[in-house]
Amino acid sequence: MLESIRNNAGGQKGLALLFGIIFGIFLQKAGVTRYEVIIGQLLLVDFTVLKVMMSAVIVGMLGVHFMSGRGWVNLSIRSGTFGGTVVGGLIFGAGFALLGYCPGIVAGAVGQGAMDALVGGITGLLFGSWLFVLLYPRLKPFMAEGAFGRMTIQDVAHLGTWQTITVVITLLIVFLFGLEWLGL
């Protein structure tokens, strides 16, 4: 069955849509598609977004490596640059600061009927994408600066895959419990 999905672009898109909808439902149920919750995170008074995303990292890390170990998915670590990270962070941060939504959350907010997300968010995504394409020739040299290759936590720590996963997940869980203990 997995081989038939792997060779079927339409099936892959259908699964992506299904899992995207499920993830969106979880985001909505967790409350992170609400503007007040996002602003609360930015003001460091409501850590719901951080808790949800850290939980998603834990689940995703376990799921991806479980599937990789069974040959269901192929992991491909991409190289990166500090320049590209800075440009991406500035674009993401500008949109986030102006509207109070990130791209994934804006889709969930549109799905629950938030007009500010529909008008400002979708317009902002389209405008930001257009602006990036327009400025790309000028940004390209800067974005290539500071290459750091295909670096992973596992490589830096000199640990095996599941050892790294165990350490990272343990640290994330301790951090999550710490936030709860502090009442955040």
Image (cartoon, rainbow, N blue to C red):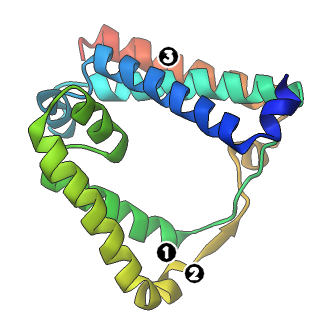
Whichever of labels 3 and 2 marks the residue nearer the N terminus, that label is: 2
Q: Nearer the viewer, residue 26 or 153?
A: 26
Residue occupied by mark 2: 144
Q: Is residue 72 visible?
A: no
- Type of amino acid under label 2: Ala
Q: Secondary structure at mark 1?
A: helix
User: Which residue is at 20% across, 34% downward?
Assistant: 38
Secondary structure, mark 2, is loop
Q: Where is mark 3, residue-wise?
A: 174
Looking at the rendered structure, the secondary structure element under dot 3 is helix
Which is nearer the N-term, disc 2 or disc 1? 1
Amino acid at the residue labelled 3: Val
Q: Locate residue 114: give its quadrant.
A: top left
Quote the CA–CA distance across marks 3 and 1. 32 Å
Q: Quadrant of the N terminus?
A: top right
- Marks 1 and 2: in contact by CB < 8 Å? yes
Q: In the image, residue 121 lies at what x, y percent? A: 21, 50
Q: Quadrant of the image for the C terminus?
A: top left
Q: Which residue is mark 1?
A: 83
Q: Earlier in the sequence, mark 3 or mark 1?
A: 1
Left or right, 169 with respect to 106, comes to right
In contact (CB < 8 Å): disc 3 and disc 1? no
> Where is 135 relative to 88, above or below?
below
